[in-house]
Amino acid sequence: MQSFANGSSSALLSEAATNLLVFLYSIPNESACEGCTQAYLGLERLTALKAVRELILASRILGSYRICALCRELRLCSTVRRLRSVLDTGRGRA
Ligand SMILES: [Zn+2]
């Protein structure tokens, strides 16, 4: 019952956000820049940015500068956020 302990907001994602998350899980390093994300998902820029914002607010991805797995350029990338902090730090949420 604790598998979704990262937050109650993770259940309802838009279609674009869900597609983006699935896309990120499918590529090396689970990380892609804005340009590649739009190109691979066939999204308009605004739609892609909204999906990114939605996933960041839901604590599903992080935005950080790194080498994009697809175009190999150093860019601001969306990266899947792993749920490791509970085990690593032992910090509770309450
Ligand atoms: Zn890229």
Image (cartoon, rainbow, N blue to C red):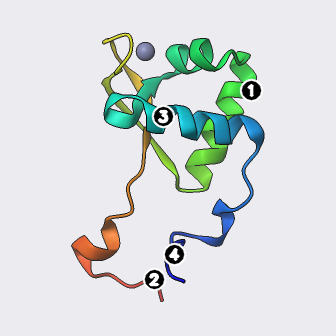
Cα distance, mark 2 to mark 1? 32 Å
Please identify, in this view, whether the residue under mark 3 or under mark 2 is nearer the observer.
3
> Judging from the image, what secondary structure is the residue with disc 3 in?
helix
- Looking at numbered disc 3 in the image, what kind of residue is underneath it? Leu
Residue 47: mark = 1
Q: Earlier in the sequence, mark 4 or mark 3?
A: 4
> Judging from the image, what secondary structure is the residue with disc 1 in?
helix
Where is residue 54 shown, x and y percent of the image? 66, 45
- Using a 10 Å C-alpha cutoff, classify the residue at mark 1 as few (fewer than 14 neighbours), some (14 to 19) or many (20 or more): some
Residue to which mark 4 is pinned: 5
- Of residues 62 and 13, the one drawn nearer to the viewer in this rendering: 13
Where is residue 43 shown, x and y percent of the image? 71, 19
In the image, residue 25 sits, relative to residue 11, either above or below, namely above
- Quarter of the image where ligand 1 sits: top left
- Looking at numbered disc 1 in the image, what kind of residue is underneath it? Thr
86 displayed left or right of 46: left
Examine the image and state in which quarter residue 69 appears: top left
- Looking at numbered disc 2 in the image, what kind of residue is underneath it? Arg
Q: Earlier in the sequence, mark 3 or mark 2?
A: 3
Where is residue 57 shown, x and y percent of the image? 61, 53
Quarter of the rendering occupied by the N terminus: bottom right
Residue to which mark 2 is pinned: 93
Cβ atoms at labels 2 and 4 below 8 Å apart: yes
Residue to which mark 3 is pinned: 24
- Looking at numbered disc 4 in the image, what kind of residue is underneath it? Ala
Q: Earlier in the sequence, mark 1 or mark 4?
A: 4
Q: State whether label 1 is within 8 Å of ligand 1.
A: no
Where is residue 90 shown, x and y percent of the image? 27, 81
> Judging from the image, what secondary structure is the residue with disc 2 in?
loop
